[in-house]
Amino acid sequence: MTPSYRRLFQNRMAKRAFRHGKNWRQVYINCGGMCLLCYEVDGLEFHEPFGEDKFGWNIFQSRVLLCHDCHMDKEHENLFTESPYLKPSRLQEDVNIEILIHGGYDQWIKDFKLEDTPARWLL
């Protein structure tokens, strides 16, 4: 990995942690690394669905993964017009690189203290 590409990768990872919290990797595992609507594995993005509590207040639900097309077309109906939202995320690519850097999937799970059990895949 060239130094400039490594710097871009590190910047994306830092921005992702800032935007989606430290548990974004667990969300990735919980969703099985695929879109929850169409099972696509490329161009994945985080989606924070709204719901209501028992008093009728709008609250954020747990984050889920959607592919770029499902996220823009079905969930947000093209509400985003700014250029960062017009291109797919590189989440899948970044996770693959991070797994390679850590020496494999099992070591990645261990290093970040993630829980990878079949029950976690059922939302």
Image: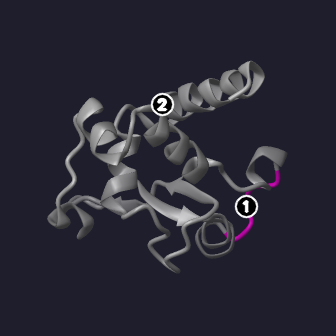
**Main structural element of the magenta stretch: helix, strand or loop?**
loop
Residue at 52% in and 47% down: 96
Q: Residue at x 57, y 55 (%)?
A: 45
Which is more toward the observer, 5 or 45? Answer: 5
The residues colored magenta run 77-81
In the shown orientation, is residue 84 left or right of residue 89?
right
> Can residue 19 be seen in this snapshot?
yes
The amino acid sitting under disc 1 is Leu
Q: Nearer the viewer, residue 14 or 7?
A: 7
In the picture, measured across the screen, residue 26 lies left or right of residue 94, that is: left
In the picture, the disc for residue 17 is 2
Name the image quarter holding the C terminus: bottom left
| Label ID, residue 79 | 1
Relative placement, left or right, of 4 versus 11 is right
Crowding at dot 1, Cα within 10 Å, few <14 / some 14-19 / many 20+, comes out as few
Q: Quadrant of the N terminus?
A: top right
Which residue does the image show at 44% across and 72% down from the upper left? 36
The kind of residue on which mark 2 rests is Ala
